[in-house]
Amino acid sequence: MDAISLLMQAGLGRLALATLQSLPLAGLVWLLCRRLPRLGAAARCWLWWLVALQLVLGLCWPSPLRLPLLPAVETPTVIVATDAQVPLSTDADAATFPLAPAAASRGDGSTVKPGPQVASVTGRAPAWMAWTLWFAWLTGVAMMALRSLADLRVTRARLRASSAAVPAAVVAQYRELTTRLGLRRAPPLRLCEQIDSPQLAGVWSAQLLLPAQLLPQMSPAAIEMALHHELVHWQRRDLFWGWVPALAQHLFFFHPVAHVAAREYALAREAACDAAVLTGNRHAPQDYGRLLLQFGVAPRAVAVVGAASPNFVLLKRRLTMLQSRSVPWRAGAALLVAAVAFVGVLPYRVVAAAPETEQDADPAQRANLAAAAPQARAQPAAKTTPQAAARVAVAPRPAVVATPVVQAQVAVAAQPAVDLDWMPAPPAPPAPPAPLPPLPAVPAPLAPIAPLPPVPPVAPPAGAMRGTFTFVDNDDARTAWVLIEGDRVHAFGTPEDLRAARRQQKSGEALWWLRDGDKRYVVRDPATLAQLRQGYAPLQDLSRQQSELGARQGALGGEQGKLGARQGELGAQQSAMAARVAQLALEQSSAALAGKPLSQERLQQAEREQQALSRQMEAIAREQAALGERQGALGQQQGDLGQRQEAALERLRTQGERLGREAIASGKAQRI
């Protein structure tokens, strides 16, 4: 029971120490993020992650780092030379208060009275208080864990309910984006009916979920921005690193710093992904801001990162960050994060410096000690009573110096009087450290860089593949096939199946590569290839129609952008006109007070111009509404095409399996 109590009190002590030590680090990180406007979102993300890491390490680190910053406790040393045996007391009071010396007898019958008694301090809380705090902490951690487990069950249910029937245009756009980002592997792309914004979800293997209801209403540019945001999460390994702030929130549920660190880390993480999407001037911040407003807010769940914000306050902060045009630091931010990690993450404990030993003493003090030793040996031996509870430093000839422990050790010499005048005065406490120099002034932000001209489209490299690709997971790919005709490829399976089929092609010949479980075949019969090619014809026609719809949606988006620009210009003119009308009204009031009425013609002319601007604004609003209806109609057509593509893909799959069985049975399929 005593061992359990000791472990419990040690755990509570670590909780309290980690709670207190996180305050300076959190204050430093908050000050850096506030005073350094050019500190990028990625650097702010890592700084708040370090605050959460310090909390976790403070509780789990085996031994804190000892910093000897306090002045040393000096202990006077008394030399005793005696041949008598000094019995040690086993009195209960002496055991309870070991630092309180009892009276000791001299050789002439007199006694040496001890100094004032000092009670020992154990530093332990009462048992009932420790048990209460321990139970309260375990209850809070259990409640946080139960809530997280419930969120995790919801996430796993969404993953199980998701579908792999993603439109072919979105899959092609996803493949092109992963190639541009240089990703060797990417998470599977799936549709989910239970979400309203894209999410990267999963505990061990992440999957990219797209909202099935919102996807038909999104333009290709919006889909690309959403996919890019989630792929940046995948590149940064945010699902893995996010466990540290979540663990700090669970273990320190009572500490506001843990919740602030988790909130600011999540905000900076999303801002870093937003900045990565807008890098390269492929997308305008205004378009990306409208996309964030379209996603709205969604509660944060376990093992999920997404483009939606958890509340409106953080959504507003993200939209404000999009307006920043300052170039963030690169090398300076990395050095700053490394310095904060080196200085403030490991748990520490401020302790007193080690006391000065005889070897460390100055020459004068060592001479005094050497001179006092013969005098102590020349005195008769002391007799101590068995009741003496003092800790006596006993030294046979030659005399040695007793080692100081924690408090002053009391030694008794058998002489008429103990002369301690020879002992040197304790050294003065060390001078306080000099104040740190002030932080250097933050340089002014650089002028905004003019946007670069759009990059012309790059021609596809030689040997590039064109065609239709339907990639499935390894677990679902029981059968697969790849039809290769020159530089056109139609694949249904995994990327490994596509590579295996390409290895079987010789001199650009047409072939059909099959896989049934672990068995692989190659079909080169022209009639069979022609039948399979006819099965792909409806799917290619639907893909072409969807591409045309995407182009029409892009054209409508351009028209909407032009209308928005015109609306902004008219709004500025209307504001100037309103200011002009107000100025004229003020002049008219002043003239009326002075008894000189002002002509009404100028005021009426300004009002007519303002009404004309209002009519133009209403006309633009009607045009925008009409464009919105046309966009909605195109979105509905895209949804219909997507359903038709799914049906055509299922028919093609059935036809391909039938043709494969016939080719194997007739011997047209050559076993590899």
Image: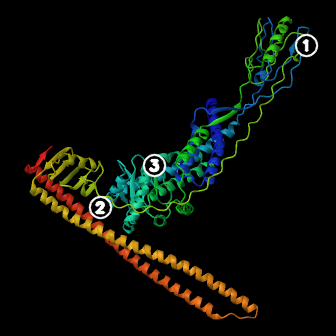
Residue underneath mark 2? 168
Q: Earlier in the sequence, mark 1 or mark 3?
A: 3
Q: Amino acid at mark 3?
A: Arg
> Which type of secondary structure does the marked residue at label 1 adopt?
loop
Q: Residue at x 15, y 62 (%)?
A: 534
* Circle 1 residues within 10 Å: few <14, some 14–19, many ≥20: few
Q: In the displayed structure, would residue 526 be above or below residue 549? A: above
Q: Residue at x 23, y 67 (%)?
A: 541
Q: Residue at x 45, y 47 (%)?
A: 237
Residue underneath mark 3? 236
Residue underneath mark 1? 417
> Which type of secondary structure does the marked residue at label 2 adopt?
helix
Q: In the displayed structure, would residue 391 be above or below residue 381? A: below
Whole-percent x and y of residue 428? 81, 28
Image quarter for residue 22? top right
Quarter of the N terminus within the rendering: top right
Is residue 249 visible in the rendered image? The answer is no
In front of the other: 386 or 282: 282
Q: Amino acid at mark 2?
A: Ala
**Colour convention of the picture:** rainbow
> Which type of secondary structure does the marked residue at label 3 adopt?
helix
Q: How many angstroms separate mark 2 from mark 1 (CA)?
A: 103 Å
In front of the other: 34 or 124: 34
Foreground mark, 1 or 3, reads 3
Q: Residue furthest left?
A: 666
